Amino acid sequence: MTHDRSLQIKALSLQVELLKATLMLQTETISALSDDPWKQWNPSDYGSAEEYCRSCLLDKNVFDSGVKYTTLCSIPLVPPKGGATNRKAVEMAEKTLIDPKSDISQTTLLRKEAAQKLLHLMEIYGLAPRPELVEVSRLED
């Protein structure tokens, strides 16, 4: 029994190390913010629905369905063909979420969720959010 316990501890230790390495890789990947020119990207600019949805702030697809629909994704922050999150796209996302007339503003819960995600990204990148975005992130459901 002691040998089994020892193996379990080793396995958990390896899992922790793997998670640390994965987190470090994700942090290095997310730390870059692109100042490349921005344009309003469309789903057709991406190689697949999966690629487009991965680049978007909002993905309303069912998590484990295995199928992605571009119509359920919005506010792309990463350009087609990958790369770093685009600074101008982050700024435009912020303007979109603050604007009460934008399409995303139709659903308070989605708008709030997107604002919270964007605030988190902006914190990672060291960007100061507008007070209006903070207000949106605190909207009542």
Image: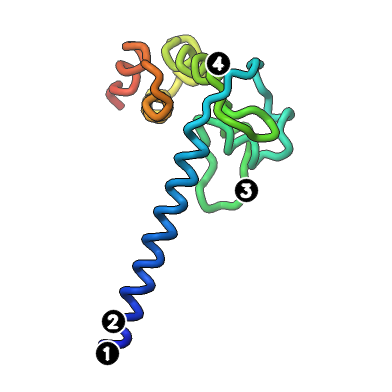
Q: Residue furthest bottom?
A: 1
Please give the name of the residue rendered at 46% of the width and 51% of the height, measured from the top-left corner: 22
Residue position marked by numbered label 2 in the rendering: 5
**Quarter in which the C terminus is drawn:** top left
Residue 68 visible, this angle = yes
Residue 14 image position (x, y, % from top left)? 40, 67
Count of numbered labels shown in the rendering: 4
Task: Please report contact status of discs 2 and 1: CB closer than 8 Å, yes or no.
Answer: yes
Instruction: Tell which of 97 and 104 is nearer to you.
Output: 97
Please give the name of the residue rendered at 27% of the width and 24% of the height, measured from the top-left corner: 140
> Which of marks 1 and 3 precedes in the sequence?
1
> Which of marks 1 and 4 precedes in the sequence?
1
Instruction: Tell which of 127 and 70 is nearer to you.
Output: 127
Residue position marked by numbered label 3 in the rendering: 67
Q: Residues within 10 Å of mark 4 (few under 14, many from 20)?
A: some
Q: Secondary structure at mark 1?
A: loop
The label number, if any, that marks residue 1 in the structure image: 1
Please give the name of the residue rendered at 48% of the width and 43% of the height, measured from the top-left corner: 26
Q: Secondary structure at mark 3?
A: loop
Q: Residues within 10 Å of mark 1 (few under 14, many from 20)?
A: few
Q: Using the image, determine if residue 127 lies above or below residue 14.
A: above
Please give the name of the residue rendered at 49% of the width and 39% of the height, measured from the top-left corner: 28
Residue 43 image position (x, y, % from top left)? 68, 29
Q: Amino acid at mark 1?
A: Met
> Which of marks 3 and 4 precedes in the sequence?
3
> Which of marks 4 and 2 precedes in the sequence?
2
Indicate left or right for 32 with 117 as reference: right
Residue position marked by numbered label 4 in the rendering: 88
The residue mark sitting in front, 4 or 3, is: 4
Marks 2 and 4, how far apart at CA: 52 Å
